[in-house]
Amino acid sequence: MAREFQRGHKARISDLTAGTDLYVGVQIAAPGLTFDISCFGLDADERLSDDRYFIFFNQPKSPEESLQQLGPQAGDTESFRVTLDRIPQHIQKLSFTAAIDGAGQMSQIGPGYIRIVAGGQEVARYSFTGSEFSTERAVMLGDFYMKDVWRFAAVGQGFDGGLEALLRNFGGEVAEEAEAAPQADAAPGFAPPTASEAPPAFGPPAAPEPAPAPPPGFGVPSQQAAPAPAPAPQPPTQPEPVAQQPDVPQPAPQPPGAPHLDQQAQMHAAPTIAAPLAPPAAAPPPPAPYGAQPQPAPYGAPGAHPGQSVPPPAQPGPYGQQPPAYGQPAAQGSGAYAVPQQGPGAGLEASLQKYREAATGQRWTPQSEKLIRADLGIDGQPVLARQGSMVLYQGKVDFSYKGAGFRGRIVGNATGQEMQLMRCSGQGQVFFAENSAHVHPIELQGDAICVNAESVLAFDESLQHEVRRIEGHGIPGGALFTMQFQGTGTVVVKTAGTPVVLPVTPTTFADANAIVAWSAGSQVIISSQVRLRRNAYPGHSGETVNLQFRGAPGNFIVVQPYEV
């Protein structure tokens, strides 16, 4: 009897069958839609480093025929033959995919499956339906991967885009055909360009010919009227003043409001004047009357040289006190040379004044950007917090262990991310913090929010909270552990740095480690972006797995500037 797989389940091939010559069948259909079903042979870095192991309708087998596309048979839309003991060592993973050819969505498909048959007997089957997808145009069905031994994983992960987008996402390159001009006897699209044709944009530039030829596809497009020839470049010489040359082409007409060319030339030709960084000095004293001798500066004091100001005369200090020596700063106080006086604003108490506790009389009060206080005596409701997050408490406060419940234990055991909570009750104040993370209280008034479990610091016990699990192939631990809060109360989240709140659009993606929270009305989809190319290409994020968010206007996500 065939073993039924669910999304995310994995098993050794040896546990399913002792054979290595396997038949893989895929059944997927929808009214009015056609599908491209393919197999990607990937290396140890999950890159399509060898295009010969991309098995699809134009390349039905690999060089040594360890992978073969057999076509529709036995009720399957497409089928493959996989001979595991003949697959070369540099191929470490086989990814079977299905993509819609043309318009359509995966939500339109009927019940389908991917199955493994060995020795004429079906040994494994993973079934799926269109209700598991939405607007995706491709789906990653299942993987054969080498981890000590060959294993099988049921993926069932949707992907936005057709076969070409899937190939680009896997690191492959799609050859783009240049659109040729209509001719009576046009050559086929795959034929090389003729001598009269311009080379394609991705080809090398053509060799120069004596006769004028059209510019290549990647050159600057020709104009009907050639512009006036620019002056030939001159070797670097001594700078010369800007002058109007009669043979220089006339400039293009200036837009309204733009400065005239002569004004621009004068502006750029003017010398740059660097101002001193120091503030301007005091104005020098007025000159002595005509015929009178200027008052000389005291011996050793700075004189009135150009660029140097004369300091004002010192004011006499209190009786019995001597002025400071030349060059020494005057003491702070009422007089120029007064002794520092101790006042009510000086001393240790004044230094620590800005760090005093902020008492607002509210349930939750941020003490700083990394510390928050909960007042248990405001409404008498206990607080649930992450174990170990208490840094200080005042009053009679009881701390007890709070389990995650039966469902939470099941999810925690499955993901290894069970959240350990403590219950804080009594009369007093409790201060919470963790690893110098920024804390942010979020107040709920009957609405709901989903928070990454790693970002939850504390919350009111009056809030309804539910453990949720987002499964996806490629997420560390196999799933993302989240908590949904709903009701009236406050939940405190922690972030590594200042977060940003963004609206949800059809193209909103976030890294699984950077996501903090999102509105409960948003739909979360696992989006795989595996780098499978020989060299990294522009536009790739470098992340293995991303979370795609969808939803109606008004939904949002919260992202922190941090990732593992």
Image (cartoon, rainbow, N blue to C red):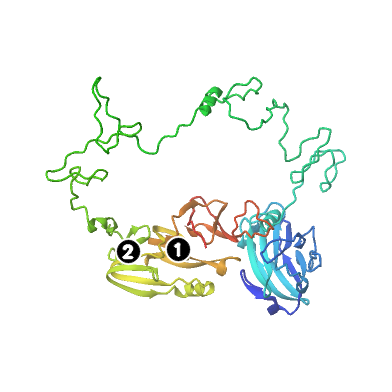
Image quadrant containing the N terminus:
bottom right
Viewer-proximal residue, 354 or 125?
Answer: 354
Q: For this view, does 491 lie left or right of residue 304?
A: right
Say which residue appears at 78% left-offset and 42% top-offset: 199
Quarter of the image for residue 31 reads bottom right
- Label 2 or label 1, whichever comes before in sequence order: 2
Amino acid at pointer 1:
Ser
Please provide percent x and percent y for residue 312: 24, 35
**Residue 434 or residue 69, whichever sits in front:** 434
**Which residue is drawn at the image coordinates 58% and 26% (left, top)?**
240
The residue that mark 2 highlights is 374
Residue situated in front as seen by the camera: 447 or 542: 542
Separation of marks 2 and 1 at Cα, in angstroms = 18 Å
Q: Measured from the top left, where is residue 109 in percent x and y?
A: 67, 60
User: For the residue carrying disc 2, how many other residues have a C-alpha within 10 Å: few (<14), some (14-19), or many (20+)?
Assistant: many
Q: Which residue is mark 1?
A: 455
Regarding mark 1 in the picture, which secondary structure is present there? helix
For the point 67% across and 56% down, the residue is 535
Q: Residue at x 77, y 45 (%)?
A: 204
Drawn side of residue 348 relative to residue 364, left or right: left
Three-letter amino acid code of the residue under disc 2: Ala
In front here: 52 or 365?
Answer: 52
